[in-house]
Amino acid sequence: MWWGLICAFFAACAYGVASVMQAIAAKATSGDEDRVDPQLLVRVLRQWKFVAGLALDVIGFVAQVVALRVLPLFVVQAALAGSLAVTAVAARTLGVRLGRREWTAVAVVCAGLALLGMSAESEGSSATGLGFRLVLVGAVVVLGTAGMFAGRASRRIRTPALGLVAGLCFGVVALSGRVLPSLAPLDLLTDPATYTLAAAGAMAMLFYATALQRGSVTTSTAMMVIGETVFPSLIGVLVLGDTTRPGFAAVAAVGFVLAVSAALALARFGEPAPIEPVSAPPG
């Protein structure tokens, strides 16, 4: 179980650093302001910072899948929300200062994840049938449609809606990785969950990059955190049989709330603040 926790924390670190690099690339890339533009991903792939961030995402994703095979979803997803603490610290290298509130939030994230680690029960990959996999396929179609509509919504609705849809897509990625019975190449090629995982991952990156490009970083990142943690965790408990150690349910609940709420407090670090140009002195 402990190596699963190490993988979850490693994934959080990889995602946290990657988000800083990708957000810079997204803001520097032009795009259609009135809709979700799939070509945005093509344009950002021309920037080395986005590609480097994507490489970190791939490494983090492998670690996440390994963690999902031995840990409950609520532990892994809360750990990934904690990547915002990593992002906040990484943003310091770009001149963004952390105040007392931000450092407190980082400490609370760590405390919440520690409580989750103490309460986690080792999990195997729960056996799920074709029906659950078809539900995941349907979820990909629904979320893809919802994301396209969100991209055409008014400015007030667009950013939170895109952030939430991106988070739900990341949640589908986690659920798909959770139900994979094996990582053997032949099993992966014949399992529908592999393809829902890939499709949901691509949509999540597109919708989140669009939200970052157009609106408030705090709003889009906060909604993404909610989407990728709360709903998948509930499905893990209610459908996939995720449990805590005997007598540790309350500890797990407190740890989850602390980790996610503190991550929301750090949502503005989903992208580093732009550096203001320095005006030349008069005269």
Image (cartoon, rainbow, N blue to C red):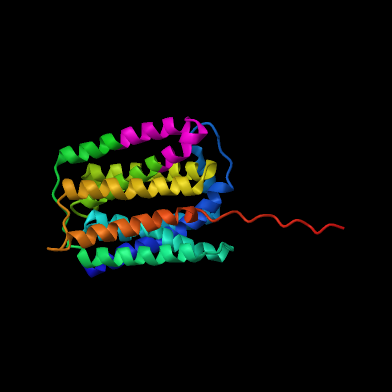
In the rendered view of the protein, which quadrant contains the N terminus? bottom left
**Residue 130 counted in the magenta span:** no
Secondary structure of the magenta portion, mostly? Answer: helix
Residue in view at x 40 percent, y 63 percent: 13
> Quarter of the image holding residue 261?
bottom left
Question: Is 132 left, or right, of 203 in this rendering?
Answer: left
Q: Position of residue 8 (x, y in %)?
A: 31, 62
In the rendered view of the protein, which quadrant contains the C terminus? bottom right
The part of the chain drawn in magenta is 140-163
Q: Position of residue 19 (x, y in %)?
A: 46, 55
Question: Is 132 left, or right, of 280 in this rendering?
Answer: left
> Quarter of the image holding residue 122?
bottom left
Residue in view at x 55 percent, y 53 percent: 24
Q: Position of residue 65 (x, y in %)?
A: 28, 56
Residue in view at x 22 percent, y 46 percent: 235
Relative to 188, is 120 above or below?
below
**Residue 151 counted in the magenta span:** yes
